[in-house]
Image: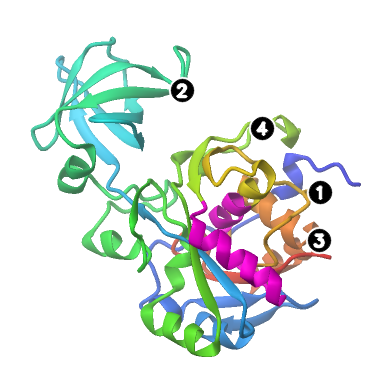
Amino acid sequence: MRHFTLGDFDFALPPELIAQHPAAERSASRLLDGTGSAPVDRTFRNLPSLLQPGDLLVFNDTQVVKARLFGEKPTGGKLELLVERVLSGSEVVAHMKVSKKPVVGTELAMDGGFTATLLGRWPAEDGPLFRFAFSGDPYALMERHGHVPLPPYITHADTAEDAHRYQTVFAKNPGAVAAPTAALHFDQALLDALEARGVRRASVTLHVGAGTFQPVKTDDIAQHRMHSEWYEVPPATRQAIADLRARGGRLVAVGTTTVRTLESWARSGQASGDTDIFITPGFAFREVDVLITNFHLPKSTLLMLVSAFTGYEHMMQLYRHAIEARYRFFSYGDAMLLARQP
């Protein structure tokens, strides 16, 4: 089998194709149908006709929290926190952007009038993240005083539109700092059309972390270490998948986070926990048959995942077509429909 390096997943993307705002309507996005040998241009509203009665759509129902918080040190120095995970009680784990790191025990004055006390690094003394104790309920404080954690390639400050559109219509379990973007294309009318078609639905939860944007820095991709994220495959979904296999339908994963959740469960046998699964070409998929996904960054772990799923050469062909046809890329961009390579 071919040995892939980081450069194999690079491509030239015109900056104007990076979507800065969502489409006027969720399901009005374009959909590149890559399930055949040649790409076909469609719209996302065509999805019901591309699926079969009895197929099972599996969504990630995580909810994006307003995890970006601003404040200052006792010295007056400005800082920014990006909450990655809420622990027990008032404790959180966060990325900290500041000119000089404060010492453990420092009480930070956060915008909105609450405080965050630095408790140490996480998950160990040399860990990359920081543990804080907030002076109130973290979820309530983030909702009241936080900002939508838009990805680094979206250049505008968050707005009321982002609070609405950088969130799926079925989000219910708060904890993500990035949206499961393939699911942003679904609106209620499309969900109703899928149900009328006989396509069934189930949900998993994976709280997407900021590490999803973490660049791969090693030319040998096998040396890359993935960030860890919490997931759950609830009993109802496990039963829906068992029923699907019994009747011979296809499991259609909405987004790479759903893929990572289902394949982590398939390998570990654990229905909930932390996963740092890294899917690259050569990976043997056990659960997912069809994938709906957005277009991903050059050299990203997500591009490696979709290349593993549908085949490297086919994926590169689809990306070349998408650039030539002026598809919109990344979180607020268009989508593609992929079949697992035999």
Q: Type of residue at label 2?
A: Pro
Alpha-carbon span between mark 4 and mark 3: 22 Å
Q: Residues within 10 Å of mark 3 (few under 14, many from 20)?
A: few
Q: Residue at x 50, y 83 (%)?
A: 194
Asked if residue 83 is among those painted magenta in the image, a careful observer would answer no
Q: Is tag 4's residue or tag 2's residue first in the polypeptide sequence? A: 2
Q: Type of residue at label 3?
A: Glu
Q: Residue at x 55, y 71 (%)?
A: 57
The residue wearing badge 1 is 282
Q: Residues within 10 Å of mark 2 (few under 14, many from 20)?
A: few
Q: Is label 1 or label 4 in front?
A: 1
Q: Type of residue at label 1?
A: Gly
Q: Is residue 8 visible?
A: yes
- Classified by dominant secondary structure, the portion drawn in magenta counts as helix
* Towards the viewer: 44 or 173: 173
Look at the picture and state if 171 lies above or below 298: below
**Residue 253 coordinates in the image, percent (x, y):** 59, 64
Q: Is label 1 or label 2 in front?
A: 1
Residue range highlighted in magenta:
233-262
The residue wearing badge 2 is 128
The residue wearing badge 3 is 313
Asked if residue 261 is among those painted magenta in the image, a careful observer would answer yes
Q: Is tag 4's residue or tag 3's residue first in the polypeptide sequence? A: 4
Q: Is label 3 or label 2 in front?
A: 2
Q: Residues within 10 Å of mark 4 (few under 14, many from 20)?
A: some
Left or right, 222 with reference to 298: right
The answer to whether marks 1 and 4 mark residues whose Cβ atoms lie closer than 8 Å is no
The residue wearing badge 4 is 224
